[in-house]
Amino acid sequence: MRGVTTGEEKMAPKETTINPNKALWEKGDFTEIAAFMRQSGELVIDSLGINPPLRALDLGCGDGTTAVPLARLGADVVGIDIARNLVEAGNRRAALGGLSRLKFEEGDACNLEGVADDSFDLVLSMFGAMFAPKPMDVAREMVRVTKPGGRIVMGNWIPNDPTFVSQLLNISSTFTPPPPEGFVSPMTWGVESHIVERFGQAGVPKENISMARDTYYFAHPEKSPAEFIELFEAYYGPTMNAVDAAQKNGMADQLHGQLVELAKAQNKNGDAGTFIPATFMRVTVQL
Ligand SMILES: C[S@@+](CC[C@H](N)C(=O)[O-])C[C@H]1O[C@@H](n2cnc3c(N)ncnc32)[C@H](O)[C@@H]1O
C-alpha cells in the first residue's frame, strides 16, 4: 500500500536526532480518536479471559484504551508508547481512575531497551506495534519480553480490506506522496505470511501462532460520522499528513468528501451518532 506512513520515510538527512515515527504520532492527539474506541477496547480485554495475578505490557498503548480496562481487572500493567503526549494522557487517566498498578512509559516497540527478558505473562498490542517501522525487530522484542508460557496478542489492520480503517488509509494514501523504496507498510502486519515469518525469525513455530479475523467498533452516541472524520483530519497523524499533501495540491475538498462518504456509508447508526465496524486480524502467539 502506498503512503500509509510510519513516519520513517520522512527522515531528513540533517535531522538525525528527530525520530520521525515519534514525530508522526506526537503531531496529532490520538486521544480524540481513542474516545470512539473505549467500548471495543473493553470487549477485547473481556475476550482474553484474564485471570490475575498477571503482569502485562500494552505496546503502542496510546492513552490506555486497553491498558485501563486490563488494570481494572487487577493486572499489573505497563503501557509503552512512543508518543510523549499519549503517555502523559495515559498517566492522567490512571491517576484519575485510582489505578496504581498501571504505569505508562515512553518507549519504542522496535527496541524495548530497559525491559528485561521474560518480564510479562501477556504482551498486548492493539493497532500499536504495527505502526513501528522495523517489524522484524518488533516481533523479536515482543517475544523477548514475554515469559515462557506467556502470550502475545496483536490486533492489526488488514490491507485492502473493504471495512473502515483499511479504506480510510487507502484513501489517505492516494493523496500522499509515495514512500521511498524499501519502505515496509504497517498494513503488512495484517497478512498471515508476514506474521508467520516475523514471529518465525524470533523463534516461534508456526503451530504456536493463531490468526483470525475479528471486528472492532468505533462508537460515539452523539458525534456524527462527518464529525468523526474531522477528528481524523485534525488529530490523527497519518490522515493529517494526507490533508497537508492534499492542501498543497488543492485537493483537500476531494479528500474530505471521500472520507466523509466512506464514514457515512459504513456507519450503522444512521445520523444520530457513530457506530462503525472495522475488520482486523487478531494474532495470538503462545510461547
Ligand atoms: C492507532 S494508535 C492505537 C493506540 C492504542 N493501542 C489504542 O487502542 O487506543 C497507534 C499507537 O501506536 C503508537 N506507536 C507508533 N509507533 C510506535 C513505536 N515505534 N513504539 C511504540 N508505540 C508506537 C502511537 O504513538 C499510537 O499511540
Image (spheres, rainbow, N blue to C red):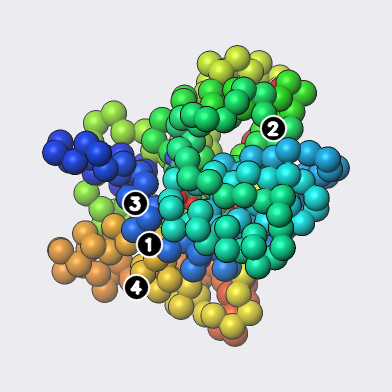
Q: Nearer the viewer, mark 4 or mark 2?
A: 2
* First reached walking from the N terminus: tag 4 or tag 2: 2
Query: Which residue bears the numbered disc 3?
Result: 24
Q: Tell whether circle 3 marks a residue whose Cβ is less than 8 angstroms from ligand 1.
A: yes
**Residue drawn at the location 35% of the way across and 44% of the way down:** 21
Rendered location of residue 151, percent (x, y) = 72, 31
Q: Nearer the viewer, mark 1 or mark 4?
A: 1
Q: Nearer the viewer, mark 2 or mark 3?
A: 2
* First reached walking from the N terminus: tag 2 or tag 3: 3
Element class at badge 4? helix
* First reached walking from the N terminus: tag 1 or tag 2: 1
Q: Tell me if residue 261 can be seen.
A: no
Q: CA distance from mark 1 to mark 2?
A: 30 Å
Rendered location of residue 180, percent (x, y) = 23, 36
From the viewer's perspective, is residue 240 above or below residue 190? below
Query: Which residue bears the numbered disc 4?
Result: 257
Element class at badge 1? loop
Rendered location of residue 136, percent (x, y) = 47, 24
Work out whether residue 152 or residue 177 is closer to the camera in this orientation and state it.
152
Mark 3 burial class by Cα count in 10 Å: few <14, some 14-19, many 20+: many
**Residue drawn at the location 38% of the way across and 62% of the way down:** 28
Element class at badge 2? strand
**Residue drawn at the location 73% of the way across and 44% of the way down:** 76
Work out whether residue 63 or residue 189 is closer to the camera in this orientation and state it.
63
Q: Quadrant of residue 117?
A: top right
